[in-house]
Amino acid sequence: MNDIAHELRFVPLTADDAPVLAAWLRLTTESADDVPLSAAPPCAADLAGSVRFAPPGTALVGEAAYRDGELIGAIRLVLPDGAPVAVVDQLLVDPALRRQGVGTALAVRARELAAAHGRTALVADLVQALPGGPDRDGGPAAFAAAVGGAPAAGPEGIHQWLDLDRHDPLADGVPEVPAGYRLVTWGTITPDRFAVAVSELGQTLGSSDPQSWDTSPEAIRTSHVRRYERMRVGRGRRAYHAGVVHEETGELAGFTSVSKTTGNPEHALQGMTVVGRDHRGHRLGRLLKLANLAHVREYEPSVRLIETANADDNHPMIALNEAMGFVPQERLVSWEAPVS
Ligand code: ACO
């Protein structure tokens, strides 16, 4: 292997450095077919916005690797607040220049960046084929092993796709709302009256007690959902929500969220669906997802492909997804490597 590391110059990826940002967008877009995530195609507005707007509770650090004035690789790390890890969000080499040691040099630089931010481990989700599922490139896992990584313990993710051209989950319409509940829908910005409930339900997966929620104006202003919306709007994403209100208490009993980028009219992402612990067993999860799908299709008639991912031990949600026509495509396996 050439000692290519000495030929590389690393340049921080910042929202204000237009030439670096443009070259990075080009590399990411051109490499999309090589990144074996089979995710929606990259959206320029989403990518450019992501440099300025990190997910709440995280910081992003990115660098572009230049050789002879050309951008040939990129690294992005997500740094969750207060955690010892750096999540490898991107570690990408120009497809024409692979197997020459550039990836190894990027991994060295990723470790330096992680160490500089006080992190002790690098973690990444890598795609692997499901038994009987579509083939997946084993290259990234071989690379991760070659640079000192290993699969981590814990649940794996299952990445699923729903192709509305092949299966219409709304063929029988939206199910009836059970007695005692009322359906509500909203768009990208969650109304004040639901902001704390959506944040609490989402962050505790429905296990916290609504009586303990702080619904003051300050709590609404600083809620998780408000911080999340800032990121979504900054990245040009639109979101669609459905919720069920428990009529007796007026509480939001559950909600679901679908979002999409500006640049991909056909693709949407099924995000969080949560039903509060006191409201389970009424098939509200299924109702929420189907009602929200009808909501999405009303405003985004071109949407055809919806992706989602769940922990492989979340059997109720995977069963619900399969009943809607989602098809498991691949496993998302967590890998870990020490920083030093
Ligand atoms: N198949 C098998 N082994 C591989 C492969 C592959 N496709 N790619 C790298 N390796 C292993 C080999 O052991 C290789 O050493 P060798 O060439 O002497 O046999 C070693 O990794 C080092 O390879 P590099 O040349 O340093 O890596 P490269 O510059 O080709 O970059 C990378 C590898 C980053 C995976 C590149 O293929 C790429 O950009 N892929 C798309 C993006 C991606 O999947 N990134 C995820 C990376 S894993 C992570 O993020 C932790």
Image (tube, helix red, strand yellow):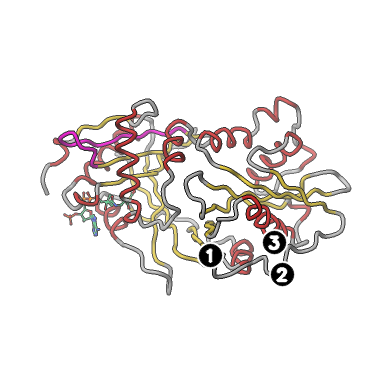
Label 2: state its secondary structure.
loop
Residue 303, located in which quarter of the rendered image? bottom right
Q: Residue at x 18, y 36 (%)?
A: 8
N-term-proximal mark, 3 vs 2: 2
> Where in the figure is residue 272, as x and y percent of width and height?
61, 50
Answer whether residue 3 is magenta in the image.
no
Amino acid identity at mark 1: Asp
Cα gap from disc 1 to disc 3, whole angstroms: 18 Å
Q: Nearer the viewer, mark 3 or mark 2?
A: 2
> Where in the figure is residue 128, as x and y percent of width and height?
39, 62
> Where in the figure is residue 17, as x and y percent of width and height?
34, 27
Amino acid identity at mark 3: Arg
Label 1 Cα crowd, 10 Å radius (few <14 / some 14-19 / many 20+): some
Q: Which residues are magenta?
A: 59-72
Cα gap from disc 1 to disc 2, whole angstroms: 17 Å
User: In the visual, does 9 lie left or right of 135?
Assistant: left
Answer whether residue 63 is magenta in the image.
yes
Residue in the foreground of this view, choosing between 307 and 223: 307
Label 3: state its secondary structure.
helix
> Where in the figure is residue 340, as x and y percent of width and height?
29, 39
Q: Are marks 3 and 2 in contact (CB under 8 Å)?
A: no
Which residue in the structure is indicated by mark 2?
A: 172
Label 2 Cα crowd, 10 Å radius (few <14 / some 14-19 / many 20+): few
Q: Residue at x 71, y 53 (%)?
A: 275
Q: Which mark is residue 286?
A: 3
Residue 310, located in which quarter of the rendered image? bottom right
Q: Which mark is residue 163?
A: 1
Q: Residue at x 30, y 30 (%)?
A: 19
